[in-house]
Amino acid sequence: MNTKSLTLSNIFFILNPMDKFVIEGGRRLEGIVEVSSAKNAVLPIMAASILATGEVTLQNIPEIRDVSLFCRLLKKLGADLSFSDKTLKINCTSINETLAPYELVKEMRASFLVAGPLLARFGKTRVSFPGGCNLGSRKINIHLKGFERLGAEVKQEGGYIILYGRLKGARIYLDYPTHTGTENIMMAAVLATGETIIENAACEPEIRDLANFLNKMGARIEGAGSSAIRISGVSSLYPCEYSPIPDRIEAATMMIAGAITKGKVFVKNAPFKFLGAPIAKLSEMGIVIEEKEDGVLVTCPEKMKATEVITGPYPTFSTDLQPLIASLFCISRGTSIIKETVFDNRFLYAQELARMGAKLEVSGDQLTIEGVDELFGANVMAQDIRAGAGLVLAGLSAKGVTVIDRVYHIDRGYDSLCEKLSMLGGKIKRISL
């Protein structure tokens, strides 16, 4: 039974944390599936709504746990919110709180994105150290160094980051092109006096989307999506309507779902121009990828070839995709290698795939996978959003029944995943105990 429901009065997507996915594998996926708006675009845009006085209207918003968590945080700060038919309305005019508390921020790293907007608008904020998926060290000092360059005072006290001060434009060099760090500093700079230049900025399309949203509200940002972003500060921002870009990670998930089941899947709204790295690797494996007017068609051969993946900042192969392609490597011909350069704890899912009959070996930042003829259903556990999605893909391919625990991780990033895969012919259901 699908227990998913939406409480419109408080915009929380109610899902039982004890839910499981049960998958009967071995079915070829075929048909059309449509991807939702990008989680990694929606969350920073929600944070940026703090900068406007008035009601921001966001369209095509996915019903995922991370959106619900971020709604709770904005509501805690004093914002008014409503959600109906995938449209989220946020009015931050009445925000009267600059404290982002531990009990909310601990659940999702993206919560730290409120630091930049709160600092810019109110000249002060107190934000708990962020939590989220257990992927190893994900330090926030790059965010803090950027805030300091803009003139903020930074203190750490009792598990909180305290920021205060009037912001002035500055030239900021990022030691690493961090995605959320670039976004946080960019949001802080839009109301700063003078000009800010962010060098070695992250180039993800979601950053460009955030800049487009901010510019629509009256900001003056140039170069977002490149390694150099120029921001001319303005005195205020006004509300607007906006629809975030499609989710390239979900699109790639559905592409790999088609491939791992030897199927033929059309992924509607897949942002082809942002999928260069995964398309290149899937093509190397012998999978046929065709760009169409409104999406991508994926056709898989009977046997796929092994290949090598090295993760890195966009436009290289995304670290979010490596647990997904790992499942595909498990049933490919030959030896595949994944080298992880972003996070230091992202191979925890390997032990779960091994329970399904995969042959893998972890050595430091490298995962070596020897392809097998088939995987077998087993009881496994999701470790994080993308690792969980990778197990779903493995279960779709496997012989027998796979039961996945801790699917609340998957719910953080995927809207109606069971329903979408079922529409393609997969036999997958959510159960509550």
Image (cartoon, rainbow, N blue to C red):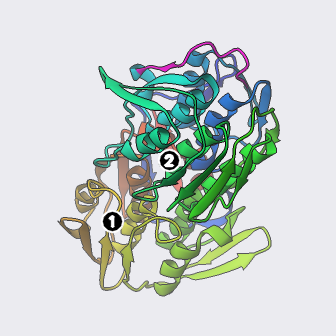
Q: In the picture shown, does residue 120 fall above or below 101? A: below
Tell me if mark 1 has few (under 14), some (14-19) or many (20+) residues whose alpha carbon lies within 10 angstroms of its own.
few
Pointer 2 residue: 180
Pointer 1 residue: 341
Please name the residue shown 41% across and 71% down the image: 328
Q: Residue 121 falls in which quadrant of the image? A: top right
Which numbered mark, 2 or 1, is in the foreground of this view? Answer: 2
Task: Looking at the image, tell me whether mark 2 or mark 1 is earlier in sequence order.
Answer: 2
Q: Residue 3 falls in which quadrant of the image? A: top right
Identify the amino acid type marked 1: Thr
Marks counted in the figure total 2
Q: Is residue 1 visible?
A: no
Counting from the top left corner in percent of width and height, residue 38 is at: 62, 50
Quadrant showing the C terminus: top left
Disc 2 + disc 1, Cβ < 8 Å: no
Per the image, label 1 sits on a secondary structure element best described as loop
Counting from the top left corner in percent of width and height, residue 136 is at: 28, 48
Seen from the viewer's position, the closer of residues 151 and 68 is 151
From which residue to which does the magenta span run?
Answer: 91-101
Q: Is residue 349 visible?
A: yes
Seen from the viewer's position, the closer of residues 429 and 312 is 312
Tell me if mark 2 has few (under 14), some (14-19) or many (20+) residues whose alpha carbon lies within 10 angstroms of its own.
many
**Mark 2 → mark 1, Cα distance in angstroms:** 17 Å
Identify the amino acid type marked 2: Thr
Counting from the top left corner in percent of width and height, residue 200 is at: 49, 62
Q: Residue 45 falls in which quadrant of the image? A: top right
**Residue 190 is a magenta residue:** no
Counting from the top left corner in percent of width and height, residue 134 is at: 31, 44
Q: In the picture shown, does residue 356 fall above or below 381? A: below
